[in-house]
Image (cartoon, helix red, strand yellow):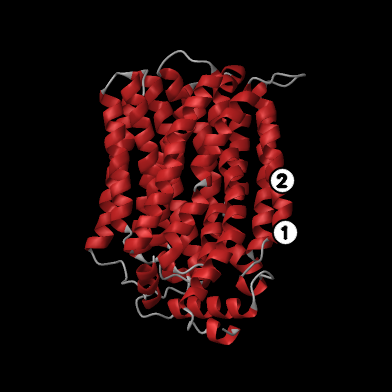
Amino acid sequence: MNDRVAATGTDPGFGDATLRKVAWRLVPFLGVLYFFAFLDRVNVGFAALTMNADLGLSAAAFGLGAGIFFIGYIAFEVPSNVMLERFGARVWIARIMISWGVLSAAMALVQGPNSFYAVRFLLGIAEAGFFPGIIYYLTCWFPEARRARIIALFMIALPLSSVIGAPISMALLGMDAGTLHGWQWMFLIEALPTIALGIMVLLVLPDRPADARWLTGAEKNWLADLLARERNHPSSHRSTTLRHIFVKPEIWRLGLVYFCMLIGLYGFGFWLPQIIQSLGQRSSLEVGLMTMVPYSCACIALVLWGRHSDSTQERPLHVAGALLLAAVALATGAWVEQPGIQFAALCITAVGIYSGLPCFWAMASRGLQGVAAAGAIALINSLGNFGGFLGPAAIGFTKERSGGYAASFLFIAACLAIGAVLAVYGRTRGSQPEPTVEARAFKSTG
């Protein structure tokens, strides 16, 4: 069959083969970038096991410092994503990675609470725009009907960074050598791959399908035609300007859903090593190995739930169901006192929190294009990341006053339940557009 016939869609297998090719070329590399992005963001949770004592940080001070990252991050999210859309993903993502790698290494130089707060704040500014930039980038390559599974494959790096990063971070934590403590070596060593990968982005990442030398002309034409038809479909939101995005109630509702999700994600992620340590006297290595278990469960569930969402083309219920599962698990962990049940509750919590993320972004990115897509995704991410500040800070505040984690668990569970209600509210209000013709076709072929 010639390229012209294939590119017009006459061959039903041509599109699937093209999307698989794009996925294999882009998603593993982007996943590696995200792996180190999240590792450099949350390794402070592992460092806290010894760093807090060295720097004289209280639980409240650590929670504030862990969360203050998001103040700088939030402030620069939308401008960063607009710049990415203007200058291209290759240059802008490389800039983001190199700058945050340098600042992540600078965490080894903090001397007390004030310098801890300052470097965390600057780290947030440096990393602003990375995650929403990648989500926007994926919308430029994949149709809506495939996005949940693609975003899930990309976001598997999120829990995987803790599965692999936990034992590595805990091993580095015990590496006192020279004049540096183990936590300082951990920050330095884990920052180096980020800088190297930032340089690689400049060399290998194409800005858009037309720039991909590994796609044939027919494949480029087919993909461009598919995405153009989807953008022009009547069911699309058709938001095209930043002004329209900022006055659109649906964007703010999605931001509130994500806010509730990230209270759970970061409250859970930053404090999990210390929570596990509180379940019994264990060595740092044992804590690291136990931390792998909830995230391993999340890796599997995240991919399966994303695929199921694509197969049904349903998003809000997949988000709400995942959040409610996590909320029930956390509430159970707050009420029982048996360490085994509490640990099982932590595993189920991880499954619920992480499984909802790909479905959420597939829902949030629907019907957006151009600078409006970049701005909307960044705005939603910015609103959500207020939860990244509130979650860790709230746990530190309540633990210092109550001496335990039960009250924090109940608070996070309530936030997750509210997020579930808001996600379903969008469905009941009919704000989710009908699947496009392309979406229905992809659904029928699996």
Q: Hey, which residue is sitting farthest front in the picture?
A: 1
> Between disc 2 and disc 1, whose residue precedes?
2
Q: Residues within 10 Å of mark 1 (few under 14, many from 20)?
A: some
Q: Residues within 10 Å of mark 2 (few under 14, many from 20)?
A: many
Question: Mark 2 falls on what kind of element?
Answer: helix
Q: Give the residue type at disc 1.
A: Leu
| Mark sitting on residue 202 | 1
Q: Hey, which residue is sitting farthest top in the picture?
A: 281
Residue 139 location in percent, x, y?
50, 66
Residue occupying image coordinates x 43% and y 67%: 144
Residue 4 location in percent, x, y?
57, 86
Tell me the residue that label 2 is attached to: 195
| Mark sitting on residue 1 | none
- Whether 410 is drawn above or below 366: the answer is above
Tags 2 and 1 in contact by the CB under 8 Å rule?
no
Residue occupying image coordinates x 54% and y 82%: 6
Q: CA distance from mark 2 to mark 1?
A: 12 Å
Q: Is residue 1 visible?
A: yes
- Whether 220 is drawn above or below 5: the answer is above
